[in-house]
Image: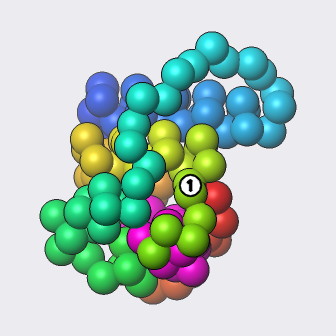
Amino acid sequence: MKERTNIGQEIETALGEVLAHVRGETALSCRIVDDPSAGRIVALRKRLKLSRQKFADRFGLDVRAVQDWEQGRRVPDRAARVLLTVIDHDPDSVVQALGAEGRETGNAQTATP
């Protein structure tokens, strides 16, 4: 197993805190100052040179949710916006934190934010 970098460990810890918050296990004081617009999500995916399906698979998202976000039919919830922000800043660390094995072969469970 590869040793995690400090940033990878920080992201993994932060994602754990976000999940605990979403589950109602802890309260976090937070303010998300990102732009969840369809254009930003499309631009992020295109910058990473991924199809919708590959983007969803790589980051554990539901492809239909990604499509709905990009077409403006749905706005990502807070947890999804946090994940999209982290993906925007350091996508490789997100892949590492989620565990790359099985991600693109369809063996991983996908979240529907």
Task: Please check the rendered image and state whether residue 20 is part of the magenta-colored stretch, yes or no.
Answer: no
Going by the picture, which residue comes out furthest to the top?
Answer: 29
Residue at 72% in and 33% down: 20
Name the image quarter holding the C terminus: bottom right
Task: Please check the rendered image and state whether residue 65 is part of the magenta-colored stretch, yes or no.
Answer: yes
Quarter-wise, where is residue 73 in the image? bottom right
Q: How many marks?
A: 1
Relative to 97, say whether 24 is above or below: above
> From this viewpoint, is residue 48 visible?
no
Quarter-wise, where is residue 68 in the image? bottom right
From the viewer's side, name the closer residue of 91 and 101.
Answer: 91
Instruction: State which region is magenta.
Output: 58-70
What is the basis of the colouring in this image?
Answer: rainbow
Percent across and percent down for residue 85 are 38, 42
> From this viewpoint, is residue 33 visible?
yes
Going by the picture, which residue comes out furthest to the right?
Answer: 24
Crowding near the residue tagged with mark 1, few <14, some 14–19, many ≥20 C-alpha atoms within 10 Å: many
30 with respect to 24 (left or right): left
Residue at 59% in and 43% down: 79
Relative to 77, say whether 9 is above or below: above
In the structure shown, which secondary structural element does the residue marked by tag 1 occupy?
A: loop
36 with respect to 111 (left or right): left
Residue at 52% in and 84% down: 106
Percent across and percent down for residue 11 are 42, 34
Identify the amino acid type marked 1: Pro
Relative to 110, say whether 28 is above or below: above
From the viewer's side, name the closer residue of 109 and 51.
Answer: 51
Q: Main secondary structure of the magenta part?
A: helix
Percent across and percent down for residue 90 are 26, 44
Relative to 108, say whether 3 is above or below: above
Residue at 66% in and 18% down: 28
Residue on which the image places disc 1: 76
